[in-house]
Amino acid sequence: MCIFHISWNFRERLRGVLHGMTISLLGLALAVPTCYAANAPANSSANSPWVATWGAAMVATQPDSTLDLSGQTLREIVHISVGGEQTRVWFSNRFGTEPLLIGAAHVALSAGGSALQPGSDHALTFHRMASITIPPGATIVSDPVPFQLPPFSNLAVSIYIPGHTMASTEHSAAKQFSYTMTGNIVDAPSLPTTARQVTSWYFLSGVDVYAPGDSAVVAFGDSITDGAHSTLDENHRWPDYLATRLAADAKTRQAGVLGVANAGIGGNRVLLDGYGPNAVSRVDRDILARSGARYVIVLESINDIGSYARHHLPYDDLEQRLEWGLSQVAIQARLHNLVVFGATLTPDQGSSYYSPEAEAVREKLNQWIRTTHVFDGVIDFDRATRDPQHPQQYLSQYDAGDHIHPNDAGYQAMAQAIDLDLFLK
């Protein structure tokens, strides 16, 4: 299949038309066709030379936890996966009702805490401007900046917010310390010890690297994907462990499957909004918009089932509706040439989500995930984490203590259960 890339000269001529100028028909000859092999769809984000090396799914800040960021510098620390020779950063005002003014932004390698590695600090620009106003509901990306970014680095993204701004868009429960301090100190080698520690990422939704030939995996799910109960600042979520395995494996390294973007939201549900928008509504911005995305792992539904258990609601056709919802996520992603894997729900006996009726729904849904043709493959997190003697509950060494979330060892076991050959499709 062939598509046409229009040359710079032709684009400039076309731009001239918008200013009342005429265009020479000769410019049409400058449209040069580029052909792709049949097995490399031109509209797949996997064809992008940019790859998501880190990501976070955004939610609306809750009224009882809104943070005043007026006149503050935010220094947000994130742990990347794949490295590259340039980087660009995504900022989101998705849930804002007012324009968001970013007065300055910098990116650097973290030296631990709020400190920067000497010589690594770079200013970010936005269409060559040092500041940008993000409209309500919008997500924007910075200009690329030359920056040799080693894989598995900790990155510090610093933004200064000069105007009156209440936090509106965030990723809470980040399991990572970030910092806020009054004044424009985005380029400070380290923030004062009086800087406030926060455990949410505000307005920061993604980091890309320029890595032609590489691609990314999107981990799409709820708090178990988000890494709830994992050790703070240690990057022990199962997507972190997966990224380490992908980089260490010769086959996936040769195939260039190295980026991992975590799109988990604690409390997320498939069918209804809860903490964050429902999963079906998140496909465009949290999966399809990720640069270089080629694969998706879907682990959702436990909060839908658990909410019925906690509120003693009749389950009726819940399992069938969850099948529909998960199918919609998979179908929409596959329409954009992504490869989608369904993941089974981990056990939860002993938690507030558990009841015999809820367990029947979980087991039926897991059986459907294992056997349906909606997904391109299956990852059996249930079998990887359950106690063989008591399969409705976690193996004790994997239980974080609330009987619904894994601990660090449990997250590692989940990542180890993923067959890396799935990413060679």
Image (spheres, rainbow, N blue to C red):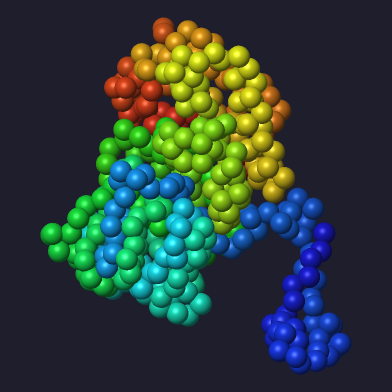
Quarter-wise, where is residue 351 in the image? top left
Res. 383 in view: no
Report x, y in % for residue 389: 41, 7
Quarter-wise, where is residue 252 in the image? top right
Report x, y in % for residue 331: 69, 38
Residue at screen point 42% across, 65% down: 100
Residue at screen point 33% across, 57% down: 166
25 lies left or right of 276: right
Look at the picture and state if 19 lies above or below 367.
Answer: below
Q: Nearer the viewer, residue 342 or 93?
A: 93
Kindly give the residue lying farthest to the right in the view shown.
25
Q: How many marks?
A: 0
289 lies left or right of 350: right
334 lies left or right of 417: right
Report x, y in % for residue 313: 50, 15
Task: Give the position of the C terminus as an image quadrant.
Answer: top right
Residue at screen point 43% across, 47% down: 60
Kindly give the residue lying farthest to the bottom in the view shown.
21
Task: Give the position of the N terminus as an image quadrant.
Answer: bottom right
Residue at screen point 44% across, 10% down: 355
Res. 296 in view: yes
Q: Nearer the viewer, residue 223 or 118?
A: 223
Report x, y in % for residue 284: 60, 49
Look at the picture and state if 24 lies above or below 59.
Answer: below
